[in-house]
Amino acid sequence: MDMYHLKQIPSEAQIRKFLRRVLFGKNVFCPECRSRAVFRYGERYRCSRCRTKFSLTSHTWLHGLRLPLKTLWLVLWCWTSQVPVKQAADLTERSRQAVYDWYGHFRAHLPHNPVILERIIQLDEAFGQGWTLMMGKQQGSRRAAYAFLDDPNPQRHHAVFFAQSHVKPGSRLYTDGSGIYQGINRWWPVKHGTDIHRKWEFGKTSEIEGLFGTMRTFIRRMYHHATSDKMPEYVREFCARFSSPEIFESPHRYLSETLTLVPPR
């Protein structure tokens, strides 16, 4: 089956209409001087006032796009739908490296939405070669926050900084028995409780333990493996999918959330 016959892929004209509406509203204007005195030639535009030449995507993070719009839409649909890289490469008829690169491009432009956890929070760490991941989950919710450290030996100040950045004062914080959390309530106003894992205590931290497991499954399924340099990106994508799943509802929603005109230099 021709990949463009998939019902998820709009026509070229529909994609262009969508991009115009998201970026310019009802009428196209010059992205440099904001004049509406522009004329179209082919698929490009020119401003009569400042003579800037531009396309629909030239002043966005899609500038320099070398994919047909329908192919771009299909790759983006694969990413928002969690289609693994290998499957996406086969479907789009692009190399795996090209799909890796585009998935990375989409990750890089996810909105930065700071997450503040409240009420009851479970916090734990995961470790890799030269790094530590601290991740917290608001109990009973789809809210997660993380800090990625280029240090395999986290210290108390890392835990305090995480709490100051992501934990609402007055919340109840549950952690394992690691020394980096001892006395954390003296540096940030939380009520602190612990599970001692070596004593097989997991009740207070079961949700964050489960979230780490879900994250590892997601990374293996989507990307097969993760090198240390890619882990921060994958963690960011996972937490965005977990905390803000609406962004990934469709390419329409993702582009509506992320695509804007770059301010003139």
Image (tube, grey):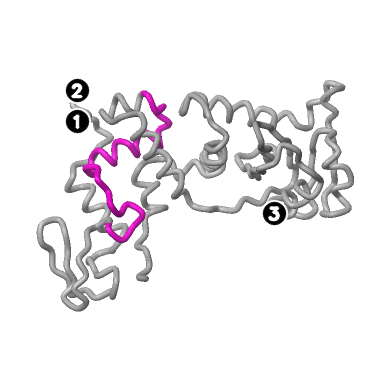
Regarding residue 136, the answer to whether it shows in the image is no
Identify the disc placed on residue 5: 1
The image shows residue 38 at horizontal and vertical percentages of: 17, 71
Could you tell me residue 194's position as x and y percent? 84, 35
Q: Would residue 198 be visible to someone looking at this image?
A: yes
Q: Secondary structure at mark 2?
A: loop
Report which residue position mark 2 lands on.
1
Q: Which residue is mark 3?
A: 165
Does dot 3 land on a helix, a strand or a loop? helix
Q: Are marks 1 and 2 in contact (CB under 8 Å)?
A: yes
In the displayed structure image, the side of residue 127 where residue 41 appears, left or right: left
Q: Quadrant of the C terminus?
A: bottom left
Q: Residue at x 10, y 57 (%)?
A: 42
Q: Residue furthest front?
A: 130
64 above or below 249? below
- Under mark 3, the amino acid is Ser
Across and down, in percent, residue 149 comes to 67, 43
- Amino acid under disc 2: Met
The foreground one among 165 and 117 is 165
The picture places residue 152, in percent across and down from the top left corner, at: 71, 37
Q: Which residues are magenta?
A: 58-86
Q: Is residue 182 left or right of residue 42?
A: right
- Seen from the viewer's position, the closer of residues 97 and 237 is 97
Q: Is residue 246 left or right of residue 190?
A: left
Q: Residue at x 62, y 50 (%)?
A: 115
Say whether residue 205 is magenta.
no
Closer mark to the observer between disc 1 and disc 3: 3
Q: Toward which corner of the image does residue 203 lie, by quadrant?
A: top right
Quarter of the N terminus within the rendering: top left
Q: Earlier in the sequence, mark 1 or mark 3?
A: 1
For residue 34, what is the image quadrant?
bottom left
Q: Which mark is residue 213?
A: none
